[in-house]
Image (cartoon, rainbow, N blue to C red):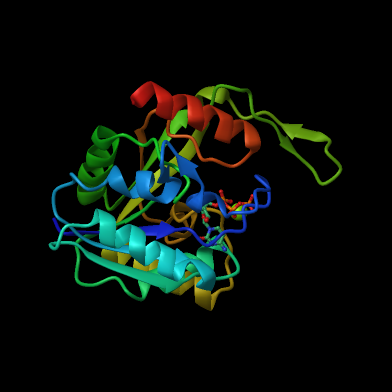
Amino acid sequence: TSKALIIPAAGSGSRLGTEIPKPYLRLAGQTILHHSISRFLSLDGLSQVVIATSPQYIDRSEEILDNLLPASIVGICVEGGTERQDSITNALNKVGDVGLVMVHDAVRPFVNEASITECCKVASKVGSAVLGIPAKDTIKRIDEEQYVQETPPRKLLWQTQTPQVFQKQIIMEAYEQAASNNIEATDDASLVERLGKKIKMVEGNRSNIKITYPLDLQLAKQLINNEQ
Ligand code: CTP
Ligand code: MG
């Protein structure tokens, strides 16, 4: 199956708080964005990579794609939007005629190739598949005042990662529906859930962290050293 990869990289990184936006920070000499895209390059059928980023970082992102992509893969950079969902919407507009669309956060440089392949395989069969890991902490739902409301059984709670992979027509429909009903979500799969379509969770790896807080960046430096 032909595949497009969408990389949202337009966030402000407010929780990390670095001057340079986090996809453009370096780990072992390369940007985090470079590492994240690299993980996908051995994947069968990858024909397109679309990065959504802030206007000031379009040139830098094009340079990263030029360095990384073989001639057989088309690289495109688009402007992101206010929310992650807006950034994905802009990127989806550039996706060509492919079977599967993968969405992967620019700030998850440690996803492994086997997990990506498995997620694509399951999405081809089921329609949609997302990587995740069983929650290690007990998770409680609270109210606005921080009073505990309920404790869902931990064995049914998984933390969702990326990539999230969809047959193209499914993610297109999900985003169109969200736009016409003003639905906001923090991941792509939740918009597909609203269509009532099946999504399968695929077990990923615990090192597939999202670099979000300063502690994650410290861990990322350790993890990249272990790989060198
Ligand atoms: N992202 C995006 N467009 C936005 C917001 C986020 O493309 N308007 C991207 C980020 O660049 C990141 C991914 O979505 O690669 C996951 O988001 P997150 O970790 O929340 O990054 P930020 O939004 O940048 O960080 P924060 O929420 O701490 O401000
Ligand atoms: Mg954010």
Is there any visible trace of residue 228 in the rendered image?
A: yes
Residue 101 found in image quarter:
bottom left
Closer to us: 159 or 81 = 81
Quadrant of the drawing holding the N terminus: bottom left
User: Image quadrant of residue 208?
Assistant: top left
Relative to 33, residue 88 above or below? below
| Ligand 1 location (quadrant) | bottom right
Q: Is residue 81 left or right of residue 100?
A: right
Residue lying at the far right of the rendered structure: 145
Left or right side of 133 for 143? right
User: Closest to the observer: 155 or 49?
Assistant: 49
What residue do we see at 14% from left, 48% from top?
Answer: 44
Check the image and report above or below for 146 versus 33.
above
Q: In the shown orientation, is residue 48 left or right of residue 45?
A: right
With respect to residue 90, does 23 lie above or below?
A: above
Q: For the C terminus, give its image quadrant.
A: top left
Compared to 125, does 85 lie above or below?
below
Question: Residue 185 location in percent, x, y?
Answer: 56, 58
Residue 54 visible in this rendered orientation of the protein? no
Tell whether 6 sits left or right of 52. Answer: left
Q: Specify the quadrant of the image occupied by residue 113.
A: top left
What residue is shown at x 37% (from left), y 70% (from top)?
Answer: 77
Report x, y in % for residue 62: 35, 66
Percent coordinates x, y for residue 8 in the rendering: 45, 59
Towards the viewer: 91 or 166: 91
In front here: 10 or 69? 69
Count of all numbered marks drawn on residues in the image: 0
- Give percent across and percent down for residue 139: 64, 29
